[in-house]
Image (tube, rainbow, N blue to C red):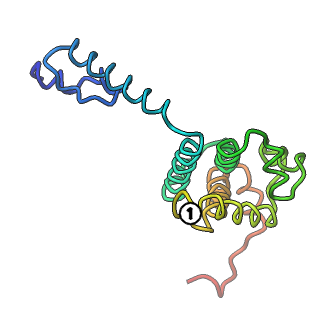
Amino acid sequence: MTSRKKEIGEVGGAEYGVDSRYSSKKDRLDDGKALMEARLQRMKNLSADQIVKAKLLQLKLKMDEYIKEPVYHTHSAFTEFLTSYIDAIYSRRNSFAKDIDVTPVLLSQILNNHREPNEEFLLRLMIHAEKTYEHVCQFHKRTWHQVYFQEKICDVITSQDKWRPEVEKHVKISKLAKV
Protein backbone atom coordinates (compact mmCIF):
# COMPACT_ATOMS: atom_id res chain seq x y z
CA MET A 1 0.00 0.00 0.00
CA THR A 2 1.42 3.40 -0.92
CA SER A 3 1.91 6.02 1.76
CA ARG A 4 -0.87 8.17 0.26
CA LYS A 5 -3.36 5.27 0.29
CA LYS A 6 -2.29 4.39 3.80
CA GLU A 7 -2.87 7.98 4.89
CA ILE A 8 -6.35 8.02 3.28
CA GLY A 9 -7.25 4.78 5.03
CA GLU A 10 -6.34 6.10 8.48
CA VAL A 11 -9.24 6.82 10.76
CA GLY A 12 -7.46 9.54 12.77
CA GLY A 13 -9.92 12.36 12.03
CA ALA A 14 -13.07 10.25 11.78
CA GLU A 15 -14.20 11.07 15.29
CA TYR A 16 -14.31 14.72 14.27
CA GLY A 17 -16.15 14.04 11.01
CA VAL A 18 -13.27 15.40 8.95
CA ASP A 19 -11.98 14.06 5.66
CA SER A 20 -8.75 12.25 6.47
CA ARG A 21 -6.94 13.18 3.25
CA TYR A 22 -4.63 15.84 4.65
CA SER A 23 -0.97 16.34 3.90
CA SER A 24 -0.07 16.30 7.60
CA LYS A 25 -1.53 14.91 10.76
CA LYS A 26 -1.34 18.37 12.37
CA ASP A 27 -3.56 19.91 9.64
CA ARG A 28 -6.09 17.11 10.07
CA LEU A 29 -6.18 17.52 13.85
CA ASP A 30 -6.43 21.31 13.62
CA ASP A 31 -9.37 21.10 11.22
CA GLY A 32 -11.00 18.43 13.36
CA LYS A 33 -10.75 20.58 16.47
CA ALA A 34 -12.10 23.63 14.64
CA LEU A 35 -15.06 21.59 13.35
CA MET A 36 -15.82 20.21 16.83
CA GLU A 37 -15.66 23.70 18.35
CA ALA A 38 -18.06 24.99 15.69
CA ARG A 39 -20.44 22.07 16.33
CA LEU A 40 -20.32 22.61 20.11
CA GLN A 41 -20.97 26.32 19.67
CA ARG A 42 -23.93 25.60 17.42
CA MET A 43 -25.31 23.04 19.90
CA LYS A 44 -25.08 25.62 22.73
CA ASN A 45 -27.38 27.89 20.74
CA LEU A 46 -30.13 25.27 20.35
CA SER A 47 -33.33 25.76 22.32
CA ALA A 48 -34.66 23.04 24.60
CA ASP A 49 -37.47 22.46 22.10
CA GLN A 50 -35.00 21.97 19.24
CA ILE A 51 -33.02 19.47 21.32
CA VAL A 52 -36.15 17.46 22.11
CA LYS A 53 -37.13 17.43 18.43
CA ALA A 54 -33.65 16.27 17.45
CA LYS A 55 -33.74 13.47 20.02
CA LEU A 56 -37.18 12.36 18.84
CA LEU A 57 -36.10 12.38 15.20
CA GLN A 58 -32.99 10.37 16.07
CA LEU A 59 -35.10 7.86 18.00
CA LYS A 60 -37.53 7.48 15.09
CA LEU A 61 -34.66 6.79 12.71
CA LYS A 62 -33.22 4.17 15.08
CA MET A 63 -36.61 2.49 15.41
CA ASP A 64 -37.11 2.47 11.64
CA GLU A 65 -33.69 0.90 11.21
CA TYR A 66 -34.47 -1.74 13.85
CA ILE A 67 -37.74 -2.62 12.11
CA LYS A 68 -35.97 -3.00 8.76
CA GLU A 69 -33.03 -5.00 10.07
CA PRO A 70 -33.54 -6.23 13.61
CA VAL A 71 -30.55 -6.75 15.82
CA TYR A 72 -30.66 -9.95 17.82
CA HIS A 73 -29.77 -8.95 21.38
CA THR A 74 -30.42 -10.43 24.77
CA HIS A 75 -31.63 -7.03 26.00
CA SER A 76 -34.96 -5.48 25.15
CA ALA A 77 -34.95 -3.08 22.21
CA PHE A 78 -38.55 -2.10 22.95
CA THR A 79 -37.77 -0.95 26.48
CA GLU A 80 -34.61 0.81 25.31
CA PHE A 81 -36.62 2.74 22.72
CA LEU A 82 -39.39 3.43 25.23
CA THR A 83 -36.90 4.70 27.81
CA SER A 84 -35.26 6.97 25.23
CA TYR A 85 -38.67 8.25 24.13
CA ILE A 86 -39.79 9.09 27.65
CA ASP A 87 -36.47 10.61 28.70
CA ALA A 88 -36.37 12.82 25.59
CA ILE A 89 -39.72 14.38 26.45
CA TYR A 90 -40.09 14.24 30.23
CA SER A 91 -37.84 15.13 33.13
CA ARG A 92 -39.72 12.59 35.28
CA ARG A 93 -41.07 9.26 34.12
CA ASN A 94 -44.03 9.57 36.47
CA SER A 95 -45.26 12.46 34.32
CA PHE A 96 -45.37 10.18 31.30
CA ALA A 97 -47.21 7.51 33.29
CA LYS A 98 -49.77 10.13 34.31
CA ASP A 99 -50.16 11.38 30.72
CA ILE A 100 -51.02 7.91 29.40
CA ASP A 101 -53.04 7.04 32.51
CA VAL A 102 -50.99 4.13 33.83
CA THR A 103 -49.51 3.72 37.26
CA PRO A 104 -45.85 4.60 37.75
CA VAL A 105 -45.38 1.06 39.09
CA LEU A 106 -46.68 -0.48 35.84
CA LEU A 107 -44.45 1.79 33.77
CA SER A 108 -41.44 0.90 35.93
CA GLN A 109 -42.18 -2.81 35.58
CA ILE A 110 -42.36 -2.49 31.78
CA LEU A 111 -39.17 -0.40 31.58
CA ASN A 112 -37.31 -2.89 33.78
CA ASN A 113 -38.58 -5.93 31.82
CA HIS A 114 -40.53 -7.31 34.79
CA ARG A 115 -43.80 -7.12 32.88
CA GLU A 116 -44.82 -7.19 29.24
CA PRO A 117 -46.79 -4.21 27.97
CA ASN A 118 -50.41 -5.13 27.31
CA GLU A 119 -52.38 -4.06 24.25
CA GLU A 120 -53.96 -1.11 26.07
CA PHE A 121 -50.51 0.22 27.02
CA LEU A 122 -49.33 -0.12 23.41
CA LEU A 123 -52.41 1.67 22.10
CA ARG A 124 -51.92 4.57 24.52
CA LEU A 125 -48.26 4.74 23.60
CA MET A 126 -49.17 4.76 19.92
CA ILE A 127 -51.55 7.71 20.36
CA HIS A 128 -49.10 9.58 22.59
CA ALA A 129 -46.34 9.17 20.00
CA GLU A 130 -48.61 10.28 17.16
CA LYS A 131 -49.43 13.49 19.00
CA THR A 132 -45.84 14.06 20.11
CA TYR A 133 -44.34 13.53 16.66
CA GLU A 134 -47.02 15.66 14.98
CA HIS A 135 -44.69 18.69 14.90
CA VAL A 136 -41.43 16.79 14.51
CA CYS A 137 -41.75 14.42 11.58
CA GLN A 138 -43.99 11.74 10.09
CA PHE A 139 -44.34 8.91 12.62
CA HIS A 140 -46.35 5.90 11.54
CA LYS A 141 -48.91 4.73 14.08
CA ARG A 142 -47.77 1.11 13.77
CA THR A 143 -44.12 1.80 14.69
CA TRP A 144 -44.34 0.94 18.41
CA HIS A 145 -46.24 -2.27 17.63
CA GLN A 146 -43.70 -3.22 14.96
CA VAL A 147 -40.79 -2.69 17.33
CA TYR A 148 -42.47 -4.70 20.08
CA PHE A 149 -43.46 -7.64 17.89
CA GLN A 150 -40.19 -7.61 15.96
CA GLU A 151 -38.45 -8.13 19.28
CA LYS A 152 -40.79 -11.00 20.15
CA ILE A 153 -40.05 -12.68 16.80
CA CYS A 154 -36.31 -12.26 17.38
CA ASP A 155 -36.67 -13.75 20.88
CA VAL A 156 -38.49 -16.81 19.57
CA ILE A 157 -35.98 -17.40 16.81
CA THR A 158 -32.89 -16.97 18.98
CA SER A 159 -34.21 -19.10 21.85
CA GLN A 160 -35.23 -22.16 19.80
CA ASP A 161 -32.65 -24.36 21.48
CA LYS A 162 -34.49 -23.83 24.79
CA TRP A 163 -38.11 -24.38 23.76
CA ARG A 164 -37.95 -26.46 20.57
CA PRO A 165 -37.12 -29.94 21.97
CA GLU A 166 -40.10 -29.88 24.35
CA VAL A 167 -42.52 -28.40 21.82
CA GLU A 168 -41.50 -30.84 19.07
CA LYS A 169 -42.67 -33.72 21.27
CA HIS A 170 -46.22 -32.43 20.82
CA VAL A 171 -46.06 -31.99 17.05
CA LYS A 172 -46.77 -34.85 14.68
CA ILE A 173 -47.27 -34.85 10.93
CA SER A 174 -50.23 -36.90 9.75
CA LYS A 175 -50.12 -38.85 6.49
CA LEU A 176 -52.48 -36.35 4.88
CA ALA A 177 -50.23 -33.40 5.66
CA LYS A 178 -47.15 -34.98 4.05
CA VAL A 179 -46.55 -33.81 0.53
Image x and y of residue 67, in percent? 54, 58
Q: Is residue 149 left or right of residue 106?
A: left
Query: Quarter-wise, where is residue 133 in the image?
Result: bottom right
Q: Amino acid at mark 1?
A: Phe
In this rendering, the count of numbered labels is: 1
When the figure is inspected, residue 36 is found, relative to residue 59, above or below; the finding is above
Q: Quadrant of the C terminus?
A: bottom right
Q: Secondary structure at mark 1?
A: loop
Image x and y of residue 127, in percent? 71, 66
Q: Is residue 155 left or right of residue 33?
A: right
Question: Between 30 and 116, which is closer to the camera in this rendering?
Answer: 30
When the figure is inspected, residue 144 is found, relative to residue 114, above or below; the finding is below
Name the residue that disc number 1 marks.
139
- The residue at the point 59 percent across, 63 percent down is 134
When the figure is inspected, residue 2 is found, relative to residue 116, above or below; the finding is above
Question: Between 172 and 63, which is closer to the camera in this rendering?
Answer: 63
Looking at this rendering, what residue extends furthest in the bottom direction? 176
